């Protein structure tokens, strides 16, 4: 009997694993179809798209203009020169831009919970996360990514970096892993809105606020704050730590050098926790009762 029970458990586990993979594939496919629909809708008015993308580019560019104005009065900020700060800015801005493009619509979840429109997503044969993430996909956010890449390119052309294969590899690793970490924060923040219902600003504090924080070198912040964005909400792995490795700078908090290679691992861990929070939040949803 025990052997038969163990056999049934093994069969269930083998069936469950492909089921999880099929749901993931289904979610990615559904996300792609919804995004394609919104892209077609956007490109139907190309002049409007160009103007809104340009506006997004200019609006985000003012952040770096402010930094340039700051450096017109000082030679260094926290011991970092303008090109070094530009590297931090470009890396965090590009990484956040990627996650904002793919998952920026997650902050609308609280509104859907309040007005009950989330119910319409629950009855569709498509994963709710894919629907919420792709809702009103905004192609204009490419402006933020373009601006971040331009600043990153300026930094790489200006800085005198002794390049090694590992430093070259670190650049795409930093941007992609950073985007994944920010994406996990988007999903975790959206999950929190199942209970808070009006917590989009709390979510924005960790996403938009987080990328603003990573723009500046860690040496200008208190150690308590640096510890918080390293060990609690690990945004430091999205920009600071890998960028400091590329620059050949000392890490904050006397961390060992190998932590610069942990962003992919941290990104996976963040997504596991964000996925668990999303499932718990979705299961606790009880509609508006109206």
Image (spheres, grey):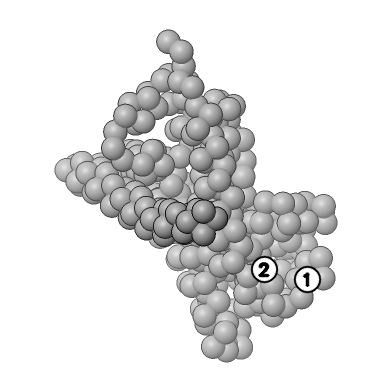
Q: Residue at x 70, y 62 (%)?
A: 217
Asked if the residue under mark 2 is in contact with the one under mark 1, i.e. CB atoms within 8 Å, the reply is yes
Q: Residue furthest top?
A: 290
Left or right side of 262 for 117: left
Observer-nearest residue: 128 or 168? 128
Q: Residue at x 61, y 62 (%)?
A: 266
**Residue 43 visible in the current orientation:** yes
**Residue 46 visible in the current orientation:** no
Mark 1 vs mark 2: which is more N-terminal? 2
- Helix, strand, or loop for circle 2? helix
The residue under label 2 is 241
The residue under label 1 is 255
Give the quarter of the figure containing the C terminus: top left
Picture coordinates of residue 174 (x, y %)? 55, 69
Picture coordinates of residue 26 (x, y %)? 31, 50
Picture coordinates of residue 116 (x, y %)? 41, 20
- Near mark 2 (Cα within 10 A), the count class, few <14, some 14-19 or many ≥20, is many
Q: Residue at x 55, y 25 (%)?
A: 198
Please tell me in which quadrant of the rendered image residue 79 appears.
Answer: bottom right
- Between the residue at mark 1 and the residue at mark 2, the CA separation in whole angstroms equals 9 Å
Q: Residue at x 53, y 29 (%)?
A: 284
Please tell me in which quadrant of the rendered image residue 128 appears.
Answer: top left
């Amino acid at each position: 009997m025990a052997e038969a029970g163990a056999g049934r458990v093994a069969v269930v586990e083998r069936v469950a694993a492909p089921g999880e993979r099929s749901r993931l594939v289904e979610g990615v496919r559904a996300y792609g179809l919804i995004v394609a629909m919104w892209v077609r809708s956007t490109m139907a008015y190309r002049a409007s798209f160009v103007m809104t993308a340009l506006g997004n580019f200019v609006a985000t560019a003012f952040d770096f203009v402010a930094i340039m104005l700051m450096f017109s009065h000082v030679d260094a900020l926290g011991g970092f020169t303008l090109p070094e700060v530009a590297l931090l800015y470009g890396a965090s801005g590009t990484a956040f831009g990627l996650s904002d493009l793919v998952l920026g619509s997650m902050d609308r979840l609280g509104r859907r919970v309040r007005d009950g429109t989330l119910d319409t997503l629950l009855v569709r044969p498509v994963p709710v996360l894919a629907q919420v993430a792709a809702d009103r996909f905004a192609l204009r956010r490419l402006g933020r990514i373009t601006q971040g890449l331009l600043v990153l390119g300026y930094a790489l052309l200006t800085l005198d970096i002794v390049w090694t294969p590992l430093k070259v590899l670190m650049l795409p690793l930093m941007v992609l892993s950073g985007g994944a970490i920010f994406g996990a924060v988007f999903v975790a923040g959206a999950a929190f809105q199942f209970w808070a219902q009006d917590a989009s600003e709390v979510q924005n504090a960790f996403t938009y606020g987080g990328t603003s924080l990573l723009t500046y070198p860690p040496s200008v912040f208190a150690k308590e704050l640096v510890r918080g964005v390293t060990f609690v909400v690990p945004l430091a792995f999205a920009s600071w730590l890998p960028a400091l490795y590329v620059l050949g700078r000392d890490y904050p908090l006397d961390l060992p050098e190998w932590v610069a290679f942990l962003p992919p691992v941290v990104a996976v861990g963040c997504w596991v926790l964000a996925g668990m929070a999303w499932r718990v939040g979705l299961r606790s949803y009880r509609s508006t009762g109206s």
